[in-house]
Amino acid sequence: MRLTPEGPALQPVWYEAPFEKGWIDICAVDVFKTMVFLQQGDQPVRHDGAPAPDGTAPLDDGILKAEDTLQQDWEWDRRFTPSGGAYFAFPYSDLWREAVVRCLVKWALRQGYTIPVIGYWPAGVKAVAHLSHDSDLNIDASAETTLDLLKPFAVNSTWCMMEPGYSPHIYERVKEAGHELALHYNALEEQNGKWDRREFRRQYHWLKEVAALDGVTSNKNHYTRFEGWGELFAWCEECGIEVDQTRGPSKGGDRGFVFATCHPYKPIAWHDEENRIYDLLEIGFLTQDLDLSDYWGKSDIVFPLLDQVERVEGVAHFLFHQVHIHNSESVRKALKTLLAEAIQRGMPWWTSQQINRWERARRSVRIEKGSISAVEAELDVTSDTGLKRGVIHIPLEERAEYGQVTRRWGVPCLSIVTDIAPGTTSLKMELNQGEGAR
């Protein structure tokens, strides 16, 4: 453990202490507090954040926003793309999560037990890509250009709509093409917006009416406008919105993993709400409008970002405004390159609604009981809603007689691929053959 990457070693991050007949494993880092601070900040947003010393991210702009409680260091935590653009390079929170699971898995095996773990995505999917758009100037022609660009790729995206919105026929085209309509809540004072619960609800009901929607799954705040700690999350809950996408970079110099994660997560409330977990998934974005200008940076950032998302099996969420797709050939070219690259890597493009449905179904899966012998594994799995082609990883001891296994968390794992039905499902798998669940 070091105070800076180049500083002297102070102590091991993980260490073991004997205790009676066993031991205690200790982490020198408060892991879960660190994850919350990285993802949500260390305090409510009440004032501007400190700008980047190199001038690439002027957070002191008089507009309260998600990045104003940024916890990462401008010098130590950013890297540079081949074209010289600075970005936050690592999903630290996701890496900490994997470190904790690795320790739990190894500790259990050391005691003669195992901890089955539900995979992040359906079988065969390493990571998921997600594309969102913010309507902003609400020009119909820009929406039509965006629809035409996406059609050959068969990619569905999430359209965050800001008042006054598009003409009615555009909403019908968007829905017919399989895209998702979402809210782009505008609380920017200079545009007559307001950070207010009633105003949020008013804009929510406006979108439902003009787009003829029964409900809205997702929201992203205009300009990443954010204030307080959990007010936005509570407003979303009240309206039945299950996904927020607000936490992402509003400046060119804080692109990347600005909140240290690319996984959907449920935010935790402040002490005034007794630290409850909001019934909301946060799916932050990584960057926006590639190749629009030197300020927003070049599209070569795509490759290191996708590499890291694949590394932690997360969501690669990119934001492209329809108006910039319409007006800029370089943006259109960058988007096409991004779409093709993710497809080539085998990353499916999901809307926030698809991600939300999968993640909530995955989180409902519980392994009630199980047994593992030298030749087979049996599990009773319970699910609230069911899961198609789910993956259950069973960590195993290092033994040569096992059949086909994968390695995760530094140990061999048997991976069961199965459709988990609502209710309780009994799974059985032979360990010496490596066949699917039956």
Image: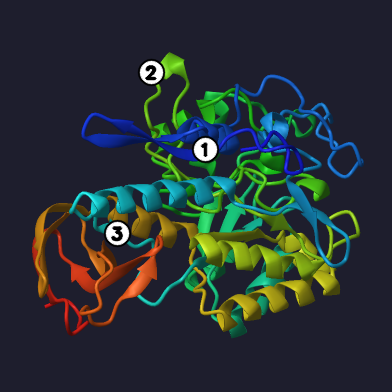
321 is higher (above) or lower (below) than 198: below
Q: Secondary structure at mark 3?
A: strand
Q: Is residue 151 visible?
A: yes
Q: Are there few (<14), some (14-19), or many (20+) residues within 10 Å of tag 3?
A: some
Determine the image quadrant of residue 134: bottom right
* Residue indicated by mark 2: 274
- Residue depicted at x 37% and y 26%: 276
Look at label 1 and name its amino acid. Met
Q: Distance of mark 1 from mark 3, alpha carbons?
A: 21 Å
Image coords of residue 103 (percent x, y): 38, 48
* Residue indicated by mark 3: 118
Tell me which label, 1 or 2, sits earlier in the chain. 1
Picture quarter with the C terminus: bottom left
* Residue indicated by mark 1: 35
Tell me which label, 3 or 2, sits earlier in the chain. 3
Image coords of residue 234 (percent x, y): 45, 29
324 is higher (above) or lower (below) than 414: above
Q: Nearer the viewer, residue 8 or 92?
A: 8
- Residue depicted at x 73% and y 43%: 5
Q: Secondary structure at mark 1?
A: helix
